[in-house]
Image (cartoon, rainbow, N blue to C red):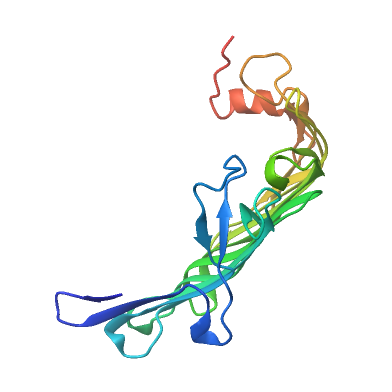
Amino acid sequence: MRFQKADGTWNKLFADWDYSSKGASSPTVYVHNPSDTQGQYLQEMPTKAFGSLDLKEDGTKEGEATFQATWRPSTCLSGKYLAEPGNLSLTGFLQRPAGTGRLVDLPSLSLTTSASQLKLVWNLSLLTQGNNADLHTEGFIQINGSSTPGTCGSLLEKFNASSGEVNVKLDTRNHAARLYFKITDWNENTGAITVQNGYLTVDGKTVTFAGVLDDANGNCVPGENLTLTFAGGQTMSLEAYLIQKLGASPCR
């Protein structure tokens, strides 16, 4: 797609649905929602695709993106797939105007799903200049569990979470934060999540936490059974902290 700016220059947005411009083509597939067992609403999806942005159409790429995916085979329709990825990945970048550094840098973003695990991993920088990122974040969220194949072989329809791990880093030019915790039990019936080894560090100051994240007393403010421990040794529940420090209002 070519479009002209007010100053008369032309820009080009290029989308390659099957990656054929970069070498061997990667076939597209037809997917459907598990509830659409007859395949009345099939959608064509790529397994590998490429896109680019060329401002002024001078051959200099101001942006690029590569997308890859594997789709879960459908047990209802032969040769078709579910709109449910086994793996998704995205990489790319977007340059600042006039070649003054990168605006967005995405070395990796991936989602993996299986019968025993869901995992999201990312590495992203925004508003970068040279090697100094205004904002950089990386980490992963992992949920472990088990799945009984559902409609048309769906693994996400009946996925029962049991444990997990969260590791998130966030840095700016002047501040740094990290959040980490393990989920050792996940009760889907009550919504209670058992947390261990948790900590939040902001600019070198750390609060640790462990216990059960729930709303057992039914006051609409979770955390009465999750204990925060501050650097000076003070402790309080997450519920008390949310009410006293952040102004959370109990419903009763």
Give residue 150's position: percent from left, percent from top: 73, 40
Residue 36 is left or right of residue 165, and the answer is left
Give residue 159's position: percent from left, percent from top: 75, 40
Residue 185 is left or right of residue 175, and the answer is right
Q: How many marks?
A: 0
Above or below: residue 82 compared with residue 173: above
Which residue is rendered at x = 65% and y = 28% of the image? 241
Which residue is rendered at x = 39% and y = 81% of the image? 100
Q: Quadrant of residue 111?
A: bottom right
Which residue is rendered at x = 62% and y = 44% of the image? 34
Instruction: Give the camera-side residue of 200 and 116.
Output: 116
Residue 56 is left or right of residue 116, and the answer is left
| Residue occupying the far bottom of the picture | 59
Residue 226 seen in render: yes
Instruction: Give the camera-side residue of 73 and 239.
Output: 73
Above or below: residue 98 compared with residue 34: below
Q: Quadrant of residue 95?
A: bottom left
Instruction: Give the camera-side residue of 116 and 124.
Output: 116
Assign the N terminus to one quadrant of the image.
bottom left
